[in-house]
Amino acid sequence: MNEAWSFSNLILISTFTCLLFWYRNRGWKRTLPLPPGPKKLPLLGNSLVHAILLSINELFSPFAFRTCHRPFNGLLSLDGQSNTAYAFPIDSDILHLRVAGGDYIILNSYEVITDLLDKRSGIYSSRPHVTMLQDLALTSSNSIGWNRDLLLLPYGEDLKAHRKLFQQEFHPNDAVLHRPHEKRALVVFLNNLIETPDEWLAHIKHMTGTIILAVAYGIHAQPKDDPNLAAAEKMIAVLNTAGIPGAFLVDVFPILKYVPYWFPGASFKRKAREWNGILSATITPPFMNVKQAMANGTAEDCFSLRCLKNAKNPDPRPDHLSSEEEIIKETVGTMYEGGADTGITALRTFILAMMCFPHVQREAQEELDRVVGRDRLPDYDDLDKDSLPYVCAVVYECLRWQPIVPLAFPHQLDVDDTYKGYHIPKGSTVIPNVWATFHDEKIYGSNLHTFEPKRWLLKTSDAHREGWKINRDMRDPTTIAFGFGRRVCPGKHMGLSSFRINVASLLHSFNITSPLDKLGQPIVPKVEYISGVLNYPAPFQCSIKPRSEAHIALVQQALLISGVEH
Ligand code: HEM
């Protein structure tokens, strides 16, 4: 009895001592305050208040953070403009929120973002864990899963191996490698626009997917109903749904992943199993085909083939993959995830901008007519040699006006950190507010919501005429739009180069205007955006018409020369 008493006392005393140490230690670390943020409720942090107003995934939409920038007058803005749902007056470049026990740090200025994500990239380059995707949808019990998605991998050796492959392929010097694929897909796109202009969005999707399939697997997409493109589109839809933080309760309460499939309310587990099938079916067969074709000596040059040829430890069996080859398969699979929707969104924003700001379109076309003329289509050289500064400024303004990835992708902090007198807890999800950075009045002036390429330009004049050049004193927008530090977009050079040539070619060959209503009056376009991970315009109609018969002839001639079936 006595012995039992002293034993339980010993346990109690040890537990108490441990708790005391833990608390003191925690208290010591926490002598510095957290960055400012909305008032937290005990235990629940900000989650309850916000959950009442908006669902958690809406909280993490860029609309929520749009008004975070100075003058700071509200965290949650329902329409992204004025209807502040939950206001608190804080003027800070760095904010802290606690949601369901997790720490979230929002970085609202370029200075703070680069101080942390670039200069301290050694500790700010992980990713928050998305249970629904990583533990359920991507994890497969068989060997054909996609267990390591580059975009979601935490910082470490696995990530380095994946990124190394990507960087080798998409190094700026190797951009030329992909240009023949891009050019072929582009002339098909231009021709499709001439034939069926109302299907412009489907044509954009087809072009973007075609380039990725060709670069990744050497596959030539069919002009219509290509099965690989259809599969990839399904995959992107899955990733977009499952990748939004808080979209599933299991992301907030990871313990739910252990609930059995048959359990009432466990539909998310059945959904994850179905999604696993979709994801594997998209990235595995085309890769295995390249491996088979390599063994037969019939493979086309592509990203997969180049990596497979360089593999140090390949599995000699054409229908099996070594762990090194698995990494290659997973890395190549990420191309669609990173490159498809971003490219499509960029072009949708460009088309909307041209419709809303017709004077910009006219000035760009004037430059193209002068530099490129009407006897040929624009080429990469025109852009690489800075011969089209106004067109280049249109591209920059698209990136700024409606950022494609307005909160980049969240990073995660690996260890406790301090910054500007604040404590930043280990494990925090760190969100760079790209939107706020691009809407900083101090840098871009007060007309932030106007699409104005001239903010990127300087006037020049030589003996003959006045012209423009890019103002190199302005911060290069591509250092913001493509993310930060060791997670910066590895497809940046390809993405940018592709976007520029598409913009130049569209402006050169077409007029983009508002469609007419029943009375023959132009419909006034609206700038309405839908935001999740990406920020894309709400569906809109537009009229895309060739500028002249001569422009049609140029496109048709280019198509003929390319030899592509269409
Ligand atoms: C206009 C086009 C594009 C934009 C605006 C864009 C933007 C971004 C951004 C903001 C990130 C997150 C960076 C961060 O976490 O700090 C990212 C990551 C990524 N992007 Fe892009 N991207 C584009 C095109 C592409 C293309 C064409 C590819 C593939 C060839 C690609 C592949 C990736 C990959 C694999 C990642 C994940 C990197 C990682 O987690 O380490 N992107 N991109």
Image (cartoon, rainbow, N blue to C red):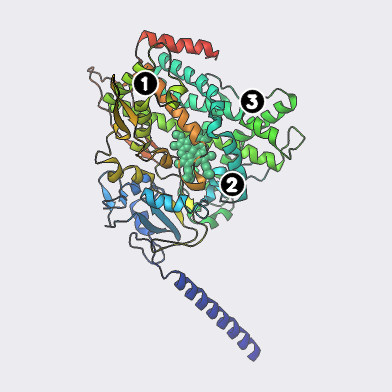
Whether pointer 1 and pointer 3 mark residues with C-beta atoms closer than 8 Å, the reply is no
Q: On the image, numbered disc 2 is attached to which residue?
A: 159
Q: 10 Å neighbourhood of mark 2: few (<14), some, or many (≥20)?
A: many
Residue found 51% across the figure and 51% down from its top: 125
Q: Position of residue 127 (x, y in %)?
A: 51, 50
Left or right placement of residue 393 versus residue 71 in this view? right
Left or right placement of residue 280 versus residue 443 in this view? right
Q: Within the image, what quadrant is residue 423 found in?
A: bottom left
Q: CA distance from mark 2 to mark 1?
A: 39 Å
Q: On the image, numbered disc 1 is attached to which residue?
A: 507
Q: On the image, numbered disc 3 is attached to which residue?
A: 301
Quadrant where the image shows the N terminus: bottom right
Camera sees residue 544: no
Whether pointer 2 and pointer 1 mark residues with C-beta atoms closer than 8 Å, the reply is no
Q: CA distance from mark 3 to mark 2?
A: 25 Å
Could you tell which of marks 1 and 3 lies nearer the N-terminus? 3
Residue found 40% across the figure and 29% down from its top: 347
Residue found 46% across the figure and 10% down from its top: 556
Q: Amino acid at mark 2?
A: Leu
Q: Secondary structure at mark 2?
A: helix
Q: Secondary structure at mark 3?
A: loop
